[in-house]
Image: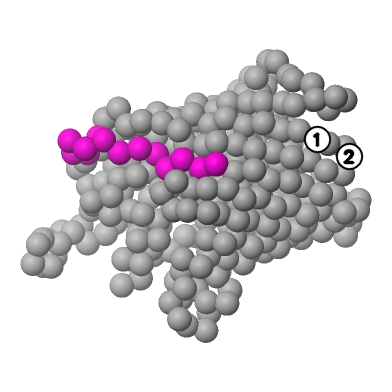
Amino acid sequence: MTAILIFVVLGFSQKSFSYNYLLLPFGSDGAVFRTALVSDPTSDFSVYYNPSFKFHSKLATFASSYLVGSSYGGILFSPAKDITAGVLFFSDGGQDEVNYEGIKIGTYSSTYLSLFASTPLPYTHRIGERVLVSGVTGKLLYQSIADRKSLAVAIDGGIYLPFNSRVKIGASVRNIGIEIKHFYEKNYFPPPVISIGGLVKLSEKLVFLLAGGLELNYGFIFDAGIRLSPVRMFQISAGYSLKGRELNTGANLDILNGLAGGFIFKVKDLKVSYSIMPMGELGLTHYVGIVYR
């Protein structure tokens, strides 16, 4: 029953191939802030949410102990100046295959993969004293369920406008694409996401982020969070996502749905991060990230 709930939440089934793994949080920061990272150029994982940002590290990677034995994670690196390449992968580890009478006839596995590359665009636009930066991402998307496979291409676009040293604005449109090889005769599309958000630096140690937008196959989304840096080597963060309400089951644990928290510990050129995201009766999801600068 738990496995069924997970795949309903993610939109995975043998009758629904909509590339919804692209909506999973990317990175340990992404688990806490989600689309609110659209306005945060300091996060090592924010280029996934807004391609107008530059990737300032050599390597950033994360893995999640997702539910029911699923493997899930991603990598970011810079193969050339102003180019960020990355991978997002998800594998369910195997599911029971049943016939129309509900009788088990075997098992099957599923693999979901996104290969992408991002770059800021070479031109900028001035709004008074401010500089508006834009960027674009190209994606190759792959899905394999049992013996069936599909392939799609998609693009992201993003803009970033720093108003001053304390207020930043960002926006992006993600997953605009089309399937070029599909499971059956019907053509499915990646799930578009439109988001706009802001970052407010409340003090040298405290930052607030929020974003709103639309997932066209889901509805209105809202993400917010706060990051505190009490000392230079350590950060703690907490966030809330409105999408957590989709996990409501009427149980006492529903109050935690949508909440997330984490910390980052820095040692010279290495950063280690950990985040935790409650998912109601489905349990806790853990994220571990490592960044090398």
> Which quarter shows the N terminus?
bottom left
> Which quarter shows the C terminus?
top right
> What secondary structure is found at the residue carrying circle 2?
loop
**Residues at marks 1 and 2, CA–CA distance in whole angstroms:** 7 Å
- Would you say the residues marked 1 and 2 are in contact, meaning their CB atoms lie under 8 Å apart? yes
Determine which residue is flagged by label 1.
162
> Quick one: 261 or 200, which is closer to the camera?
200
> Quick one: 235 or 226, which is closer to the camera?
226
Which span of residues is magenta-colored?
182-194
Type of amino acid under label 2: Ser
> Quick one: 31 or 67, which is closer to the camera?
31
Type of amino acid under label 1: Pro
Query: For the point 63% across and 26% down, which residue is it?
Result: 135
> How busy is the neighbourhood of tag 1: few (under 14 within 10 Å), some, or many (20 plus)?
some
The colour scheme applied to this rendered structure is: one colour
Determine which residue is flagged by label 2.
165
